[in-house]
Amino acid sequence: MYNPVKDGIERSVQLVTYTEAQPPADLGELVHCFWELKTATAPLANDFHLHVLPDACVNVLFNMVDTDIAAITALQTKYEVLNLGRSFHYVGIQLLPGVWRGNRDEIFDRFVDSPYAGTLPLVKTAETLAALDFAGQQPVLAALARRLANDGLILSNGITAKILAHLDAIRTVADMAVVTGMSARQLQRSLKRTTGFSPHDFLKVVRLQRSFDRGYLTSYTDQSHFIHSFRALTGYTPAAYYKRFDV
């Protein structure tokens, strides 16, 4: 099971809460989780900075403070630090890698502070969500995910599912091709189309995420390789990251 780590919240921050909830069983091949990130009291004494890590997932994001603001978001192969200010409340749907089949040009990889201008019913959904607590929001988020699935905007991805299920057996892109039963060229085309990643970059990201759960020995050739890759994708050595952020 692919279980990406939550984004970095500094250990010194006490008044910001992050909560995840599992999706209904019928969405298990599409949605990793529903999530909520908010200030427990407002405003904070200082601006809050979220250290966002690449995980190959796509998020459908809603701003509960300003329901006109919503977006489809994702990172590629490097962390991003988002200044969320001193008071905020977001909820979202985290889609599994390779599931999003909508227009990839609409994906934001940075802080979103502008009204949603696309054709999806995100603003209407946000207005419904804003009147509910997180438990009450989950059926609304599930209904939206089902609508996106019915419209063909999110679809299960057998290729990425095979890769994620066999990460322990994958050390190279060649291994990935064997696991998926594809040629290197077929794999390149498939992953680029459905995730936006090359096979090499996709492997870097999911291997990083697996290291939080399993440690580096199952995914990297040695400790030096692990530390170099970890720092390139997160901006920190493993020791410094674990010291600073609540993992």
Image: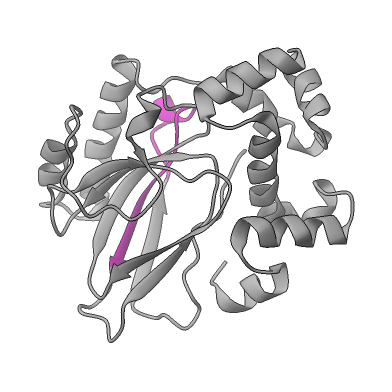
- Which quarter of the figure has residue 233? bottom right
Residue 31 coordinates in the image, percent (x, y)? 43, 34
Residue, x 26% and y 51% (percent of image)? 135
Q: Residue at x 73, y 13 (%)?
A: 182
Asked if the stretch drawn in magenta spans residue 37, the answer is yes
Give the color scheme: rainbow, by chain, secondary structure or one colour: one colour
User: Which part of the image, by quadrant, shows the N terminus?
Assistant: top right
Residue found at x 63% / y 30%: 198
**Is 59 situated above or below 97?**
below
- Residue 5 lies in quadrant: bottom right
Outermost residue to the front: 105
Q: How many marks?
A: 0
Q: Is residue 188 above or below residue 1?
A: above
Q: Farthest residue toward the right?
A: 222
Magenta region, residue range: 22-38
- Toward the viewer: 95 or 174? 174
Q: Where is residue 99 shown, x and y percent of the image?
A: 47, 26
In this rendering, is residue 217 above or below 237? above
Viewer-nearest residue: 244 or 133: 244
